[in-house]
Image (cartoon, grey):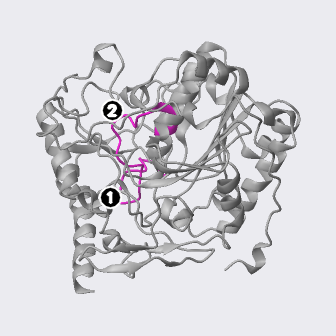
Amino acid sequence: MFARALRATAVAVTLALVAAACSAGNARNGETASSSNEQRGIPSYSGEPGGAPSGSARSSPFDAYPKAHVASPEQVALARRHIKHVIFLVKENRTFDTYFGQFPGADGATYGYTCDGTKVPLVQAHDSTPGPDHSFAGGIHAIDGGKMNCFDTLYGGLALQSYVQYGESQIPNYWAYARHFLLGDHFFTSVYGPTGIEHLDTVAAQTGRFIDHERDYPAGQYGANGIPREYCGDPTERAYRMRRLSPGQVHRVGVLENQARPGPIFHTFASLQWPCIDVPTLPAELQKAGVSWKYYLGHNDYVETPDWITYWHGGPMMKNVVDPSTLIPDISSGHLPAVSWVVPNVEVSDHPPDSVCAGENWTVDVMNALQRSPEWRTTAVVMVWDDFGGFYDHVPPPHVDIYGMGPRTPLLLISPWVKGGTVAHQTLEFASVLKMIETIWNLPSLTTRDASASDMLDLFDFSGEPVPKLILKPRDCSSAY
């Protein structure tokens, strides 16, 4: 216990030192492009040239990007014929092992390891369970250079709060979708955390070099008026962002991440900057191409994605940002757009400590409405969780650049055209969902991440009979424990 307390204290001190040491200035060290994607004009994941240095794999602290599926022209043609709607549903703060560690045939675990090497069981979680730290720094600490053993050092995790798990009886409808449709067990978040920047990745395949959303400490991040997270609406707000790095500095950051030392990263290679960026986004590309889209945005203090983007905040694209209460009416009335991002209200997003039962019931209501509508036959729903929430997972994420990837979350792919009853083991991330959309609607890549990602079309079978509908009954949450 003393060792865990000492490590957790070190984490807290690191974050405090990071906050105190960083200034709002900007370094102007130019990064250099090295990948073939960049040579073709596709920006790196960071939105700036560079991201991972050139050189041999032996000398690099980074992993090669995992081999991705690229659909044949015949597969693409079938996908365009059968899929007219994609719903990208993003829930909150759960790892794969937390929800599906016991799922038959999946790469799950029922125990984990602490930072001192102790093997501990993943005990039964409660319907309302608090979540430990899941920041960018927290993700680096928990992953611990791929050892996946320091979740017990996270703030809020000293008493092993990270090491919990739900069984099928606690989330029966999520498991029913996984058994009937498709479950992905190697879907990783695109960055180490947290929520705010993860959601940037779901529309832009990058975070614009930001490694945190705004927080109340250190003071001043909420700007002169003290109103939190107005982003482009308040030029005095600040959040932590990587400076522009040389290849050597990128290499050093990668080494520090492998050593689980985020403190020097924030102190030396990041600074507090205005979280307002001008980067390409998939909604903007869809709009330009005349493809219908909506961003169904619920109340969540940490998800204000449109307000991070200069041309989206307060611009004409805001008319496509709507309340998620309009999703079922849009489905039922035949007004579902071609591409939808869905961010539920936080109380039904599975965000700890909110009720998992309530979040699952909300999902069931949406899926039932979709399957009862004419849109069902031409729709694919990609449901994921936005970050690890501070919870344990045993699979090391690929370390492809200085931003991640982060720990696994579940992937549920729900459509009449999926390979039903399948557990898919392909390595995927948020950029893979964007790549699928880009492939179906013939849109360009945004960054090297989505250019390199799998298009996910190998998870579908367009040649056979469609998977039958699965109408489920919402649960009585009064007895959920």
Is residue 62 depicted above or below 150 in this figure? above
Please provide percent x and percent y for residue 242: 27, 40
Left or right: 344 as drawn, with respect to 397: right
Q: Residue furthest bottom?
A: 1
Residue 245 at x, y = what percent? Answer: 19, 34
**Does residue 337 belong to the magenta stretch?**
no
- Residue 328's image quarter? top right
Query: x%, y% of residue 284?
Result: 56, 22
Which residue bears the numbered disc 2? Answer: 46
Is 215 a magenta residue?
Answer: yes
Query: What's the magenta bit mostly, secondary-structure-wise?
Result: loop
User: Is 142 on the left or on the right of 317, as rendered?
Assistant: left
For the residue labelled by badge 1, is the local secondary structure a helix, a strand or a loop? loop
Q: Is residue 191 left or right of residue 425?
A: left
Q: Which mark is residue 65?
A: none
Q: Point out the tag, 2 or 1, that comes first from the N-terminus.
A: 2
Residue 68 vs 254, above or below: the answer is above
Farthest front residue in view: 464
Q: Amino acid at mark 2?
A: Ser
- Would you call the spot at circle 2 few (<14 residues within 10 Å), some (14-19), or many (20 or more)? many
Query: Does the rendering let one see residue 220?
Result: yes
Indicate the secondary structure of the residue bearing disc 2: loop
Distance CA(mark 2)–CA(mark 1): 25 Å
The residue at 81%/33% (across/down) is: 375
The part of the chain drawn in magenta is: 201-226
Q: In the image, what residue type sits under mark 1?
A: Pro
| Residue 218: image tag | 1
Image: 325 above or below 49: below
Q: Residue at x 45, y 66 (%)?
A: 391
